[in-house]
Image (cartoon, rainbow, N blue to C red):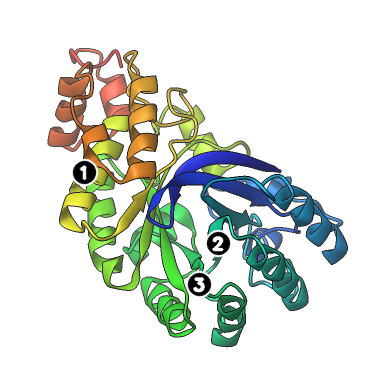
Amino acid sequence: MYWIGEDNVAGEPGKVLYVILPTIGCYRYRIGKACYMCSYPAQSPRNTSQEKILNYFLEALSKIKGREGRFAVRIFTSGSFFDSAEVRRETRRRIFEEIAKLENVYEVVVETRSEIIKKEWVEELAEIVKGKWFEVALGLETANDDIAEVSINKGNTFEQFVRASEIIHDAGARVKTYLLLKPIFLSERDAIEDAKYSIERAEPYTDTFSINITNIQRGTLYELIWEKGEYRPPWLWSVVEVLKWAKKRFPRKRFLSDPVGAGSTRGPHNGCGNDRTFDRAIRKFSATQDLKHLEDLPTDCLEKWRYIVNEGILDWQLVKAKTSQYSDF
């Protein structure tokens, strides 16, 4: 799958070619230890080849060849780009050689788990696209190892993230850090505090933060808990709170967020008719890094959200509290 969208490209608004390569997906999923919220590897093909992967990428890249504008190419594999079981070293080099030919591509991003990284692998790709903004994205999710284990089943630690980020920087690339806003078993307040804590701990090792907002994917533990009424995806107000705090706290860092599924019960939502406005505002901020897009938002449900956050209660407790004036959200 590939598509073109708008976002921040190497520090300025631009367009992004998103490409999901048809690899066999994350090794943790293949050995039965997938992250609890993730169903992406389940959609990966069981049978593929390096030739198919390369040809698919070339097909996607052809959509921006010769086009005017400022482009980024962000490559996903539903796993790790540096896992040779998914993308072999020669295929990685071929992909980057094709990107290097395009003058309209200013930014290149690939992703990997923290434990699957070697300096020489990153170094050779950084040399191929020298002069472009090259980032390697790491799925930290949270800087709290207990949350990573109990709520996510991540399978690696903050210490491993630090080691991987140091390798990436030493190899001449930048680091993008994925954080998950509101893993299961956290209240809305705990989720906000965990995001802020994780940003502060990861900031010395990070060039770009991607605040990934929990949405309910099919066939996951998160879906099972959500179906029982014991989990609610984050409020969009919480996303705005984290982004505003983060950009003010670390103005030189890039903060991106794509509110997938915003406004639906499976995705982040306020649930009071203003979700589209929040969705657009978050995307505008992401593209421009201008906090003005997060100001003067409609205040419907603001007091309800504040009540939930200030009381620190779990959302399903609120839903079941029939006597509460806030139980109808």
Q: Nearer the viewer, residue 321 or 271?
A: 271
Mark number, residue 265: none
Disc 3 to disc 1, C-alpha distance: 31 Å
Q: Quadrant of residue 207?
A: bottom left
- At horizontal 70% and vertical 48% (from top left) the residue drawn is 42
Disc 2 to disc 3, C-alpha distance: 11 Å
Q: Quadrant of residue 243?
A: top left
Give coordinates of residue 47: x percent, y percent. Answer: 87, 56
Q: Are marks 2 and 3 in contact (CB under 8 Å)?
A: no
Q: Nearer the viewer, residue 199 or 123?
A: 123
Q: Does residue 22 appear anywhere in the picture?
A: no
Q: Amino acid at mark 2?
A: Val
Q: Residues within 10 Å of mark 3 (few under 14, many from 20)?
A: few
Q: Amino acid at mark 3?
A: Gly
Q: Secondary structure at mark 3?
A: loop
Give coordinates of residue 60: x percent, y percent. Answer: 73, 48
Q: Amino acid at mark 1?
A: Lys
First-in-chain label (1 vs 2): 2
The residue that label 2 is drawn on is 108
- At horizontal 39% and vertical 47% (from top left) the residue drawn is 183
The residue that label 3 is drawn on is 131
Q: Nearer the viewer, residue 134 or 301?
A: 134
First-in-chain label (3 vs 1): 3
Q: Secondary structure at mark 1?
A: helix
Residue 83 position (above or below residue 262) = below
Q: Residues within 10 Å of mark 2 (few under 14, many from 20)?
A: many
Q: Quadrant of residue 275?
A: top left
Residue 88 position (above or below residue 291) = below
Q: Nearer the viewer, residue 220 or 26?
A: 26
The residue that label 1 is drawn on is 244
- At horizontal 19% and vertical 23% (from top left) the residue drawn is 302
